[in-house]
Each structure stands twice: as structure tokens, then as C-alpha cells.
Image (cartoon, grey):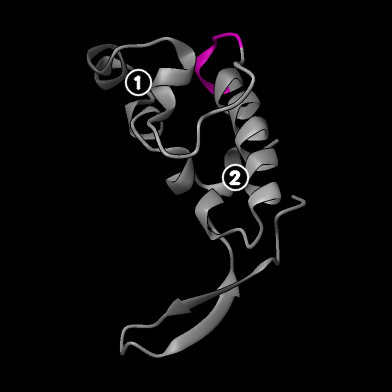
Amino acid sequence: MKYSGIPYLALDGNGREVERSARVIGELPAPAERMVACREAAVGIAKLIGRPAPERIAYGVPAYLAFGMTRAEAKGHEHAEILLKSAADMPLIYCQ
């Protein structure tokens, strides 16, 4: 995965900074990287849910909106957990 190993400063259980790899789109360091990841996540999630891929998932809104779904439809979907996340909180594993 091309996002593996991108450094992110997080806090450990004691509130101290630790460096680890970015895990979600919002932890990517540059806005341009986040925009590319939002496009790639749209493709990855489309494959997962069996719908056509939108151009991208908007950064600050739930993913289901990009797929033309209502909140109720998303909540009833077998992949509701991912559809209800915003792109900022989207795990990088969905970025193809």
C-alpha cells in the first residue's frame, strides 16, 4: 500500500507524542495527499459495497452521501460502519 509508513505524530496513553504511521485519511500530512486518498477511497468503497464509484468522497461529510444514499439506507447497509464515516476518518486500507 502506498500510504504505508507515512509518519504521523500521535499521543500515547500518557499524553506523550509518539510517531507512528498514518492510519486514516485525516492523518496524511498534505492536503493534496488527502484529496488523492479521497478519490482512491471512493473506488475502494465502491468495490466493497457493489455500487458505481463517485469521483471522490468529500473530506468532511459521511461517505454514504457520495454514493447517493440516505442516512437510513447507510445505517441498514451491511457496511454501515464504513459508510457512516467521514473521509477524514476513513481508514487508509480503503484507498486503492
**For residue 53, which quarter of the picture?**
top right
The residue located at (55%, 26%) in the rendering is 45
**For residue 65, which quarter of the picture?**
top left
Say which quadrant the C terminus sits in: top right
Q: Nearer the viewer, mark 2 or mark 1?
A: 2
The residue located at (35%, 20%) in the rendering is 78
Single out the residue that lies furthest toward the front: 31
Magenta-colored span? 48-52
Return the residue nearer the eye: 73 or 31. 31
Residue 82 against residue 18 in the figure, above or below? above
Q: Which residue is mark 1?
A: 78
Residue 88, given in percent of the width and then of the height, sits at 47, 46
For this view, does 38 lie left or right of residue 32?
left
Query: What is the secondary structure assignment of the residue under circle 2?
Result: helix
The residue located at (60%, 26%) in the rendering is 56
Circle 2 Cα neighbour tier, 10 Å, few/some/many (<14 / 14–19 / ≥20): some
Residue 94 among magenta residues: no
Residue 31, given in percent of the width and then of the height, sits at 64, 51
Residue 32 against residue 4 in the figure, above or below? above
Question: Which three-letter amino acid code belongs to the residue tagged 1?
Answer: Glu
Query: What is the secondary structure assignment of the residue under circle 1?
Result: loop
